[in-house]
Amino acid sequence: MDSNVISELIDNIPADVLKSGMPGNEKQKISQIKMIKQISAMLFKMIPTGINFKAHTTDNFQIWGTLKRESLRESSASLVLKHGNDIHGTWFMSGIIDTLPNCDSDFSANWGTVISSFREMTSPLQDFFGKQKNDIGVTPIAIFRKIPHVKATL
């Protein structure tokens, strides 16, 4: 999921489409649309822009992370056009493990309400971007796959 693409989609939803499901008169609907677009713009400025990915390891663990747009060889739109939502095959990744599943429970118990409040705020964002609490969070350094050896004849 590319957060910039989602932000652009929200900005470009026709007002008539948004208004159709909203309560209130025309003036109230326009006011609500402006507020929704302002809030979404603010949220997308706060979150790191990038492309979210999720993968499964051979041990049946799920990993989740973000890819920097400038580190990709091609655009996220090109990847979606070529592969759709899923890129199949066996891939290898070298990276940094940032979070383990449920590893912060002791930490949050010591900090009490501050961490609980922060978790309540960030949990919906993590859900929106596909990060579940059982996922291993990673920062990839390199993602690659093995290219099979093919004999070429000229």
Image (cartoon, rainbow, N blue to C red):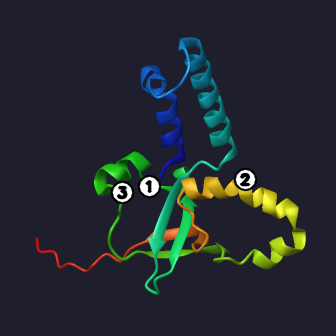
Observer-nearest of 143 and 7: 7
* Residue at image mark 2: 121
Instruction: Give the CA distance from mark 1 to mark 2.
Output: 34 Å
Q: Position of residue 28 (x, y in %)?
A: 60, 17
Q: Amino acid at mark 3?
A: Asn
Q: Amino acid at mark 1?
A: Arg
Say whether residue 117 is left or right of residue 24. Answer: right
At x 61%, y 36%, the residue is 40
- According to the picture, the residue beneath numbered tag 1 turns out to be 73
Cα separation, mark 1 vs mark 3, equals 18 Å
Report the residue marked by disc 3: 85
User: Within the image, what quadrant is residue 147 found in?
Assistant: bottom left
Q: Is residue 49 above or below residue 116?
A: above
Q: How far across and down, in percent of the image, does residue 39 sit?
A: 66, 34
Q: Where, by quadrant of the figure, is residue 134 drawn?
A: bottom right
Q: Position of residue 153 (x, y in %)?
A: 11, 74
